[in-house]
C-alpha cells in the first residue's frame, strides 16, 4: 500500500519538545463534505488547512497517511500489519505515535496492535471522532490535540503512557480493555472492567498506578503474523443445533471465541456439550467470554458452566470480545504449539485481563 508523508516542524526555530508520528488511516475524523454533500476523506496534502491546530504545537510531527483512507469497517489484519510496520520503522526516531482511525473497529485494531507490539516502551494513542473535522462542532480537534499531548508526555525523561491506548472524549483507556459503546454521542468508548488511564480536564490527570510501566532495556518486537482461521459464536436462547454444527465444522477452523451468558454460562443441553466437546477433540480452541460488558467469566461457579470447564473450554476471565478475538488471531499466528496457545490465552499478556481467576 502506498503511503503519503509530510513533516511539520511546529517548534521552529526552537528545539521541538518531542517528535511524534501521526498515522492517518481514515474514519470520520478525517472527512469533509464534498460538493454533493457526501462525506469523503479530505485530500491529505491539505491536512494543515483542515487541522490548523497541528501548527500550534512545539513538536516535530511526521504525518503518514494511507494512500486511500478507509472507513474502519473496511479495516482488516493487512492494515494492522501496516500500522505495526510503520511504528517499527519509525520507533527509534519518534517519542510517540498517534493513530487516527475510524471509531467503529478502533477497539479491534488497537487491541490487535497491543499484542503485535511486544516490548513497547512508547505511547501509541488511537483516536478519531464522531463528527467530521469539517463540522463546526467536531470532536476531532480536541481528541487529536489531547492525544498529541499524551503521546508526547514525559516524566523524568520517560514516557508517561508507554502502552497502546485509546483517547476519546476526555478519557484515556487501555486499548485492549476498551469497547465502542455509543454511536450518537461523543462518549463513544468505555472500559467497563478497567479504570481509565487518564482524564483530561484543565490538566491531564494520569492514573499512573494503572498504566503499564516503562521497562528499561525493553526492545520492541513486532509480530505481523495473524491467523484469521477463527470465529465468534454468540449463544442465545433457542439457538439451533444446525447453526452450531455448521459454525464448528467450518473447514480449517482453529479457534472460536464463544460469547456466553453472565459469568460464562451456557445451556447444558447435551447436543451443545457434545458439539463443543467434539470440536475441542478435533483440536479447535474454544475461548469463553461473557456477553456482559462488565464482570467476568468464572467457569464452574454455576452448574451451567462447570461442564465447559470439564470439556476443556478456556475461560476468558474479564477480557473484552475485541481483545479475545485479536489475542487468539495473534497467538495462533505466532505460536505453533496449541497447548501453549491455550495457556497464553488464559494469562494476561498486555494487561488485557485480570491476573486473578
Ligand atoms: N464509520 C466510521 C468509521 O469507523 C465511523 C467513525 O469514524 O466514527 O470509520
Image: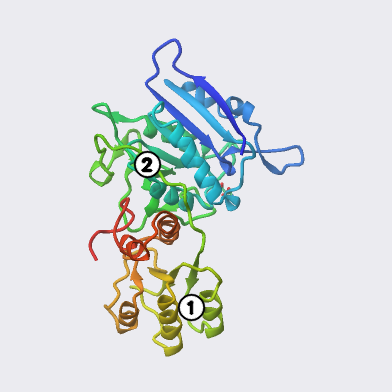
- Badge 2 crowding class, 10 Å Cα cut-off, few under 14, some 14 to 19, many 20 or more, is few
- Upstream in the sequence, badge 1 or badge 2? 2
Residue 287 picture location, percent across and down: 39, 68
- Answer yes or no: disc 2 within 8 Å of ligand 1: no
Residue 170 picture location, percent across and down: 40, 42
Disc number at residue 236? 1
Residue 36 picture location, percent across and down: 77, 41
Q: Is residue 4 visible?
A: yes
In the rendered image of this protein, does residue 182 appear above or below residue 269? Answer: above
Tell me: 305 left or right of 64: left
Residue 131 picture location, percent across and down: 57, 43
- Residue drawn at the location 24% of the way across and 59% of the way down: 355
The residues tagged by marks 1 and 2 sit, at their Cα atoms, a distance apart of 40 Å
Q: Secondary structure at mark 2?
A: strand
Which residue carries the number 2 mark? 221
In the rendered image of this protein, does residue 87 appear above or below residue 184? Answer: above
Quarter containing the N terminus:
top right
- Residue drawn at the location 44% of the way across and 71% of the way down: 284
Disc number at residue 182? none
Q: Is residue 188 visible?
A: no
Amino acid at each position: 500500500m502506498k503511503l503519503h508523508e509530510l513533516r511539520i516542524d511546529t517548534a521552529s526555530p526552537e528545539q521541538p519538545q518531542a517528535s511524534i508520528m501521526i498515522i492517518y488511516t481514515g474514519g470520520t475524523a478525517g472527512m469533509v463534505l464534498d460538493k454533493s454533500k457526501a462525506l469523503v476523506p479530505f485530500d491529505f496534502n491539505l491536512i494543515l488547512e483542515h487541522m490548523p491546530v497541528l501548527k500550534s504545537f512545539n513538536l516535530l510531527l511526521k504525518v503518514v497517511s494511507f494512500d486511500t483512507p478507509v472507513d474502519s469497517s473496511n479495516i482488516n489484519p493487512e492494515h494492522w500489519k501496516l500500522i505495526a510496520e510503520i511504528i517499527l520503522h519509525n520507533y527509534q526516531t519518534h517519542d510517540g505515535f498517534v493513530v487516527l482511525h475510524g471509531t467503529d473497529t478502533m477497539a479491534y485494531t488497537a487491541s490487535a496492535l497491543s499484542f503485535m507490539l511486544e516490548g513497547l516502551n512508547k505511547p501509541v494513542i488511537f483516536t478519531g471522532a464522531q463528527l467530521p473535522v469539517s463540522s463546526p462542532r467536531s470532536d476531532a480537534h480536541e481528541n487529536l490535540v489531547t492525544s498529541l499531548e499524551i503521546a508526547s508526555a514525559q516524566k523524568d525523561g520517560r514516557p508517561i503512557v508507554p502502552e497502546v491506548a485509546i483517547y476519546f472524549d476526555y478519557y484515556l483507556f487501555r486499548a485492549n480493555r476498551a469497547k465502542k459503546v455509543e454511536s450518537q454521542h461523543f462518549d463513544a468508548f468505555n472500559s467497563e472492567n478497567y479504570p481509565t488511564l487518564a482524564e483530561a480536564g484543565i490538566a491531564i490527570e494520569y492514573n499512573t498506578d494503572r498504566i503499564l510501566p516503562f521497562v528499561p532495556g525493553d526492545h520492541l518486537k513486532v509480530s505481523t503474523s495473524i491467523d484469521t482461521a477463527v470465529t465468534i459464536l454468540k449463544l442465545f436462547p433457542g439457538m439451533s443445533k444446525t447453526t452450531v454444527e455448521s459454525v464448528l465444522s467450518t473447514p480449517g477452523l482453529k479457534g472460536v471465541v464463544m460469547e456466553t451468558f453472565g459469568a460464562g454460562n451456557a445451556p447444558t443441553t447435551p447436543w451443545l456439550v457434545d458439539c463443543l466437546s467434539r470440536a475441542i477433540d478435533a483440536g479447535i480452541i474454544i475461548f469463553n467470554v461473557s456477553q456482559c460488558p462488565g464482570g467476568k467469566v468464572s467457569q464452574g461457579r454455576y452448574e451451567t458452566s462447570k461442564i465447559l470447564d470439564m470439556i476443556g473450554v478456556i475461560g476468558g476471565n474479564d477480557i473484552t470480545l475485541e481483545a479475545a478475538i485479536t489475542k487468539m488471531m495473534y497467538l495462533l499466528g505466532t505460536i505453533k504449539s496449541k497447548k501453549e496457545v491455550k495457556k497464553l490465552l488464559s494469562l494476561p499478556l498486555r494487561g488485557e485481563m485480570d491476573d486473578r481467576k
